[in-house]
């Protein structure tokens, strides 16, 4: 039996409500609203989140949570995890475009360094489990580092 989960977001814009006309509000019930704007490169307000950064954050965060889950299944204890992700957005001549790739660069510290080989291999399984990575059509590259 297939399970489905439904998520809700309300996006709202009113003329003159925010100083930059490319800025708007994003609301999820029970949580703080976010002011979102176009990226600075597209004449947005760089003091606010933009959809491109939010997508990159979602991929990085989802991979980390999937990795934590799979490490727990293999009794691997993590002491630290930092990802400095990058995304490449490519524009076409007609000004349409999209991400052409994202690179995740998770830097991981293990409690037991002898588990490094197994821990390294688990990034592949985490990627396969990541809901957000499974939802995008561009490659997500994972360059893991252990220290």
Image (cartoon, helix red, strand yellow):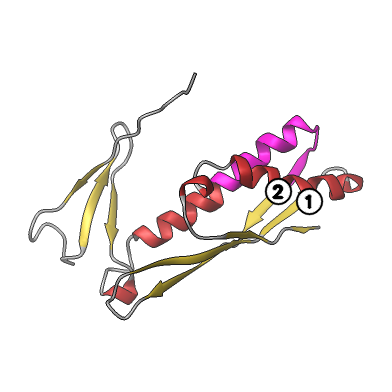
Q: CA distance from mark 2 to mark 1?
A: 6 Å
Residue at (47, 52) in percent of width and height? 136
- In the rendered image, which quarter is residue 49 located in? bottom left
Q: Farthest residue in the right direction?
A: 114
**Residue placed farthest to the top in the image?**
1
Vertical placement of 76 versus 95: above or below? above
Residue 105 relative to residue 111: left or right: left
Residue 117 position within the rendered picture, expressed as x and y whole percent measured from the top left: 86, 50
Q: Residue tagged by mark 2?
A: 123
- Looking at the rendered structure, the secondary structure element under dot 1 is helix
| In contact (CB < 8 Å): disc 2 and disc 1 | yes
Q: Residue at x 49, y 18 (%)?
A: 1
Which label belongs to residue 95? none
- In the structure shown, which secondary structural element does the residue marked by tag 2 occupy? helix
Marking on residue 120: 1
Q: Is residue 49 at least partly visible in the picture?
A: no
Q: Quadrant of the C terminus?
A: bottom right
* Magenta segment main secondary structure: helix
Residue 75: % across, % down:
80, 32
Left or right: 65, with 112 as reference point:
left
Q: Is residue 26 magenta?
A: no
- Closest to the observer, 39 or 131: 131
Whole-percent x, y for residue 88 in the image: 49, 70
In which quarter of the view is residue 6 placed?
top left
Q: Is residue 30 visible?
A: yes
- Circle 2 packing at 10 Å, graded few (<14), some (14-19), many (20+), is many
- Part of the protein shown in magenta: 62-80
């Amino acid at each position: 039996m297939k399970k489905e989960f439904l998520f809700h977001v309300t996006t709202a814009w009113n003329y003159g409500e925010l100083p930059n006309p490319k800025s708007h509000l994003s609301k999820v019930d029970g949580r703080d609203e976010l002011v979102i704007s176009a990226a600075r490169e597209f004449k947005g307000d760089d003091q606010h989140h933009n959809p491109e950064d939010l997508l990159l954050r979602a991929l990085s965060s989802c991979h980390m949570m999937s990795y934590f889950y799979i490490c727990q299944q293999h009794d691997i204890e993590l002491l630290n995890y930092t990802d400095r992700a990058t995304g490449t957005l490519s524009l076409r001549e007609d000004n349409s475009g999209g991400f052409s790739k994202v690179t995740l660069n998770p830097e991981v510290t293990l409690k037991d360094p002898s588990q490094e080989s197994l821990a390294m291999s688990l990034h592949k399984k985490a990627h396969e489990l990541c809901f957000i990575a499974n939802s995008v059509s561009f490659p997500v590259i994972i360059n893991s580092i252990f220290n």
